[in-house]
Amino acid sequence: MRIILTKDYQDMSRKAANIISAQVILKPDSVLGLATGSTPVGIYRQLAQWYEKGDLDFSKVTTVNLDEYRGLSPEDSQSYHYYMEKNFFSKVNLRADRHFLPDGNNEDAAAECARYEALIGSLGGIDLQLLGLGHNGHIGFNEPAKDFVGSVHLVDLAERTIEANKRFFSSAEAVPRQAYTMGVRTILCAKKILLAVSGEDKADALFRTLNGPISPKVPGSVLQLHPDVVVVADAAAAGRLSRESGKDG
Ligand code: GLP
């Protein structure tokens, strides 16, 4: 695992975007696994700027997103479909039929999970998976639990996640209680993983993800098992990592 420490959010966004950009330059038909949340907004902005300048071409790229709220249609302004369209898809030359998310509108959870897992398999797997980190250590919507769930599944959102995500909704009550998410095996099957983390409020989650026991109570800790993970963290998010390593030295 490589940890790249950056000054601040902007520096984190640029360095993470550089890694994605290198992937697309080296393999123009890459399958990129994408994430939502506040963290990647700056990364998408940077990638869009490089596309505008003519430095990047997404015409052969395919994307698959980690997760989607259950019960929200793509047109809903709180859906991850909407977020992706607004922050990335509409800004670059990705083909409209080459970006995929779980279908939050599919009431048949078993069918939706099987469909999305099969879809990812049919693409030949993910070349580079971008991840953010929840305050409770979640990745995608893999919430702390008794056991890991391997494949795409329907999850009940943790109270802490509902609290954290209510800022995007009119109230906590308006936040959907369930979501479809890639499972930890789906994520670990990606050839490379890029974990982007920013802010002091993530310092504890990042420390436990990288240094704690591998446990479904901190879902991100499974990343310790992956052979090719790059963590790009700003100074605030890396605060506890830096403090604790200082103690050892
Ligand atoms: C959300 C998403 C995750 C994201 C995480 C952190 O609930 N499902 O994929 O990484 O929480 O979000 P943020 O970057 O807004 O802190």
Image (spheres, grey):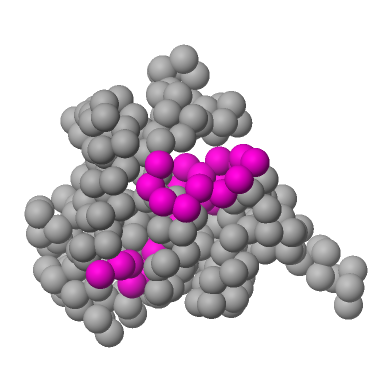
Q: On the rendered structure, is 100 left or right of 152? A: left
The residue drawn where x is 53% and y is 77% is 227
Residue 219 shows in this picture:
yes
Height in image: 31 above or below 25? above
Residue 136 % position (x, y) = 63, 42
Residue 175 occupies quadrant = top left
Q: Is residue 182 left or right of residue 2?
A: left
The answer to whether residue 51 shows anywhere in this view is no
Which residue occupies 55% across, 57% down? 197
**Left or right of 192 on screen, residue 218:** right
Residues in magenta, as a range: 124-153
Residue 76 in percent (x, y) is at: 24, 28
| In magenta stretch: residue 17 | no
- Who is closer to the viewer here, 97 or 184? 184
Q: Quadrant of the C terminus?
A: bottom right
State the quadrant of the N terminus: bottom right
Q: Main secondary structure of the magenta part?
A: loop
Q: Depth check: give the residue in front, 62 or 109.
A: 109
- Please tell me which residue lies in front, 155 or 11: 155
Residue 131 magenta-highlighted: yes
- Asked which quadrant contains residue 241, the reply is bottom right
Asked if residue 194 is positioned above or below residue 81 in the image, the reply reads below
